[in-house]
Image (tube, rainbow, N blue to C red):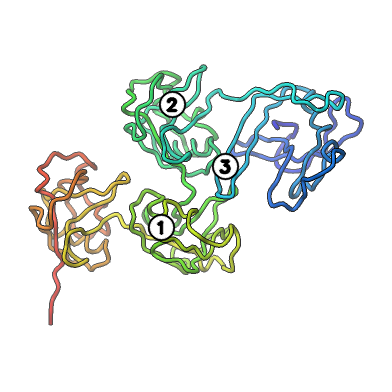
Amino acid sequence: MFSTCSTGTGVYQIKPDGYAEPFEVYCEHDLENVVWTVLERRLDGSVGFNRAWFDYKNGFGFYGSEFWLGLDKIAYLTNQRNYQLRVEFSTESNITYKLHYDYFMITDEWGNYTLSNIELHTSNQIRLVNGTTHMEGRVEIYHNGQWGTVCGKNWDDNDASVACRQLGYSDTGRATGNASYGEGTGPIWLENIACSGGEGSIDHCGNSGWGQQNCGHNLDAGMRCLTVRLASGERPHVGRVEVYHNGQWGTICDDEWDDHDASVVCRQLGYGDVGTANGRASFGSGVGQIWLDNIACNGSENSIENCTSNQWGQHNCGHSEDAGVICGTVRLVGGISPREGRVEVYHDRQWGTICDDEWDDNDASVICRQLGYGDIGIGWQSAKFGEGSDPIWLDDVACSGSEQHIEECRSNEWGSIIVDIVKMHRFVIPVRLN
């Protein structure tokens, strides 16, 4: 409940007008640095809530763990002035739900503590539409009594991360554009959103103003909220695996950690279906919680939370055993051995090919290095390993030969290509037989 507290998280003593004696309340900061009075908290079942009426009237529990403030105190507080109310709860699968009310009030004991007034908070709230899960979709915002969309111009991961935080999911989001979750209808409320990443809601970020836009619904913004991320890697698709649970990021123990598990993480992050597992804190030791241990994915799951494992927080590990992953963004297809084939790259959640314009041995050598097959490759053209299918992601690739990854080489922009499909390149890696 917002808020009877003066500064930050902790226990405060207050005395509402008309109440006989001062009493203590527990207050907590939220992600927007707003302080709320906590009426009820349930975390781990350490306090029983199957209680008599007397306890629910007067309150019970411990502020350091689980508690109920008490109907009598809540009635006095809500009759002092208008208070906002926020309700948050998480499921066993780490899905967080949140409700926000502009004000609420309950009657006193003579009125049987009846809820007498409540109004749902909808102004500038957001929702995700048309996603395959509740954590992804087209971004829509409620303003001036109407739902509308957000223009995808300049929409990026910082903006998506703020929107995820606003929805109560996590603080890591992946932005999509070009109506990737379908075109919306009605007004396009915001354009040129420019979040730093630390804001509590997207309407607090820089933008062009409500309804001030030059955009069509074909550019509607979308996003995915992530419960897994890669940390301390040199590139976005490699790093220590961290998962979000109970409002906190933590690591995974490398016990039983294998390529099946790593591939699920890569799929969940949108980096394709090929992952290589690393252990022994190869990307550095994390801090805080070790959330998961003994993960056993079959490789087909869409999220690491869907794999079997110990219960959240149950492990026998230290951070020296933190799991890592390398997600493959390039592969070889159609060859007679794993070391040759048509080159395909993963971008925007889809595998595609490379046009052979300007394709040479320098480019092929970078692919070989990226795949861990050495530093020497021979480039081939004219679809020797068979024609791929759309999209054709890259054209006019120009590597010097020293790059570690094909994405570091000069090329046309992703997808900006008009070519005959038979020009998609291929290469083989030479071997010497003694």
Direction from residue 416 to residue 23 in the image, left or right = right
Can you identify the residue that label 2 sits on? 207
Q: Amino acid at mark 3?
A: Thr
The quadrant the C terminus occupies is bottom left
The Cα atoms of the two marked residues, 3 and 2, are separated by 28 Å
Q: Amino acid at mark 1?
A: Gly
- Place of residue 204 in the rendered image (x, y in percent of width and height, measured from the top left): 52, 29
| The furthest residue to the right | 20
- Place of residue 394 in the rendered image (x, y in percent of width and height, measured from the top left): 20, 46
Residue occupying image coordinates x 42% and y 54%: 301
How crowded pointer 3 is (Cα within 10 Å; few <14, some 14-19, many 20+) is rated as some
The Cα atoms of the two marked residues, 1 and 2, are separated by 32 Å
Pointers 3 and 2 in contact (CB under 8 A)? Answer: no
Can you identify the residue that label 1 sits on? 233
Residue occupying image coordinates x 40% and y 19%: 186
Q: Amino acid at mark 2?
A: Asn
360 or 347, nearer to the observer: 347
**Which of the 4 image quadrants contains residue 70?**
top right
| The furthest residue to the left | 382
Q: Earlier in the sequence, mark 3 or mark 1?
A: 3
In the structure shown, which secondary structural element does the residue marked by tag 2 occupy?
Answer: loop
Residue occupying image coordinates x 79% and y 23%: 79
How crowded pointer 1 is (Cα within 10 Å; few <14, some 14-19, many 20+) is rated as some
9 or 309, nearer to the observer: 309
Direction from residue 67 to residue 295 in the image, left or right = left
- Place of residue 412 in the rendered image (x, y in percent of width and height, measured from the top left): 19, 43
Direction from residue 22 to residue 264 in the image, left or right = left
Can you identify the residue that label 3 sits on? 96
Which is closer to the viewer, label 3 or label 2?
A: 3
